Amino acid sequence: MPKASSSQVGTGSREEDSPGESSKLDLFSFVPFRLNRLAAEVSSALASEYRERYGLDIPEWRVLATLGFRNEACSAQYISHCTRTHKSTISRAVTTLMQRQLVERVANADDRREFALRMTQKGKALYRELIPRLLRREQEILSCLSAQERKTFAAMLGKIEKSLDLVQTAKEAGVKDAY
């Protein structure tokens, strides 16, 4: 088998020294590794915006971001599903946000055993203050790309998300009107 060149970006190239020896995976060309590393770095860069100024960690921000994206209360399970964050991590974040009076529980009118979550007025104010800062930071991160490259990048991400059946639009997420 011919050796794969490291220039085959995104192919998960495998290199074999000789027949019979185990294959080696070049992590730096393996798309799942690259996406995970990129996501971690971007998440960390954004986290500095809400950690330093507002004392929020990543799971707490994910809860606020999901609630802020919606115009109605939703379950912690919904937040866990949308953000791909373990439910125990979301539960701890909700507890902290409730203690800080940024989030509150509301009873489900159809089933009193169930609760939904929504931002308090204090939580909404923090969210509205934070969004422009995060959007500016996102632009800084993407500034290495031209406008056309950003469009192409967004389209490619969308194709991958669609192939994995991930929610891609506010409509698919069940969002009626944003704040």
Image (cartoon, rainbow, N blue to C red):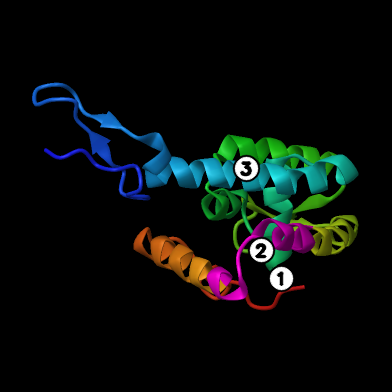
Q: Earlier in the sequence, mark 3 or mark 1?
A: 3
In magenta, the rendered stretch is 134-150
- Residue at 37% x, 50% y: name it: 9
Which of the two marks, 3 or 1, is nearer to us in this view? Answer: 3
Membership of 131 in magenta stretch: no
Q: Which residue is mark 1?
A: 71
Task: Sort mark 2 into few (<14), some (14-19) or many (20+) by Cα contacts within 10 Å.
Answer: few
Indicate the secondary structure of the residue bearing disc 3: helix
Which residue is farthest top? Answer: 21
Q: Which residue is mark 2?
A: 109
Q: Number of numbered discs present?
A: 3
Residue type highlighted by circle 1 = Asn
* The N terminus lies in quadrant: top left
Q: Main secondary structure of the magenta part?
A: helix
Circle on res. 41: 3
- Image position, residue 11 (x, y; %): 31, 49
- Quadrant hosting residue 54: top right
- Residue at 64% x, 48% y: name it: 42
Indicate the secondary structure of the residue bearing disc 2: loop
Q: CA distance from mark 3 to mark 1?
A: 30 Å
